[in-house]
Amino acid sequence: MLPTDFGDDRVLHILWMNGGLSCDGESVSLTAATQPSIEEIVLGALPGLPPIELHWPYLDYQNGPDLMTWWHRAERGELDPFILVVEGSVPDERNKPEGYWSGFGNDPVTGQPITVSEWLDRLAPRATAVVAVGTCAAYGGIHAMAGNPTGAMGVPDYLGREWRSTAGVPVVCVPGCPTHPDNLSETLVYLLNQVAGQAPMIPLDEELRPRWLFEATVHSGCDRASYYDQSDFVAGPGSSACLVKIGCWGQVVRCNVAKRGWINGVGGCPNVGGICIGCTMPGFPDKFQPFMENPVGAATGPVTAFVPLVQTLRGFTVRVGMEPVDEPARS
Ligand code: SF4
Ligand code: SF4
């Protein structure tokens, strides 16, 4: 299952394709990663990682305009192993009589653009792993919302949920709009270690996300959760109370951003006053609209009903904790 023949003398290539339908948010996000940073990954600062060459339009310090050479080499089977990172959703190029929706580089013979879906057809069968970064690449995202004239879809929908890489790995999805910087760099490091034979198969959940990053809800890591418990909800800006009544979906969305912070442990949507709009989830954005409305109003009802009891019990435990404890009678 793991490429155990990966030796010290071999370089592990990462091909980052940002030609899908996207805003390049994941590329921008990765520049903010700190745990670890992309510089630490590519400069060999992390002990035990194999030598890495990153072919990324944002940081192609090695090849400049010849970036596409690496894609053609991978297609010819000259790069092994390599990880293909896909940013942006995959349009359906068959749903129109002519033209193309999204391309990445040109065909050296014809000079015509090579579409993103064609690159997936060429490279996925040879890839050691395919990583769909951002909600667009993972599940279609904004481009796949109602109407969807491009027929946009996520990489797992394009390749099929049953698809496996040459190392037996399903498409690995790191959703988010954009992806959390450290979730992205941490997942890449995990896969690099796995390809090097130093980590077991990456554990993924039913939506193909790294399980350890996406198993808890936003709510469970939110700085405002104790306010929710007390039914203390904000009515407008300038309050540190719970945001659920102005549209926070944190109770049902699985994302670690509130727990992890955004950059270097600081920030994280609800912690800094931004409602969770479910950007890591399949079906985003359609299933989470309209934004800025109480999405789970029913959920506040039962809690509100129990507030007097909870407050009574809290008051009891606080009082008991402050009262002097009776010394046992000495005989
Ligand atoms: S702001 Fe959102 S995530 Fe935080 S406690 Fe309220 S509902 Fe939960
Ligand atoms: S907290 Fe919500 S809006 Fe913020 S990154 Fe996570 S899923 Fe997206």
Image (spheres, rainbow, N blue to C red):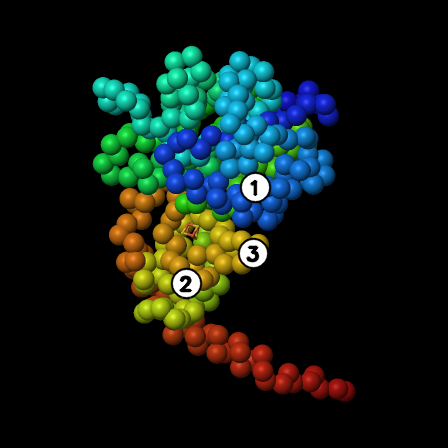
Q: Residue 54 or 211: which is nearer the viewer?
A: 54
Residue where numbered disc 3 is placed:
265
* Lower position in the chain sequence, tag 3 or tag 2: 3
Q: Position of residue 18 (x, y in %)?
A: 44, 33
Which residue appears at 58% of the width and 82% of the height?
322
The answer to whether 298 appears left or right of 36 in the picture is left
Residue where numbered disc 1 is placed:
185
**The residue tagged with tag 1: helix, strand or loop?**
helix
* Lower position in the chain sequence, tag 2 or tag 1: 1
Disc 1 marks a residue whose amino acid type is Ser
Gap in angstroms between the C-alphas marked 3 and 1: 14 Å
Q: Position of residue 306 (x, y in %)?
A: 37, 68
Q: Determine the residue located farthest toward the right in the rendered image.
A: 331
Q: Residue 118 or 6: which is nearer the viewer?
A: 118
Q: Is residue 169 visible?
A: no
Q: Position of residue 50 (x, y in %)?
A: 68, 30
Gap in angstroms between the C-alphas marked 2 and 1: 26 Å
Q: Where 142 sits versus 19, above or below?
A: below
Dot 2 alpha-carbon crowd within 10 angstroms: few under 14, some 14 to 19, many 20 or more: some
Quadrant occupied by the N terminus? top right
Disc 3 marks a residue whose amino acid type is Gly
Which residue appears at 44% of the width and 77% of the height?
312
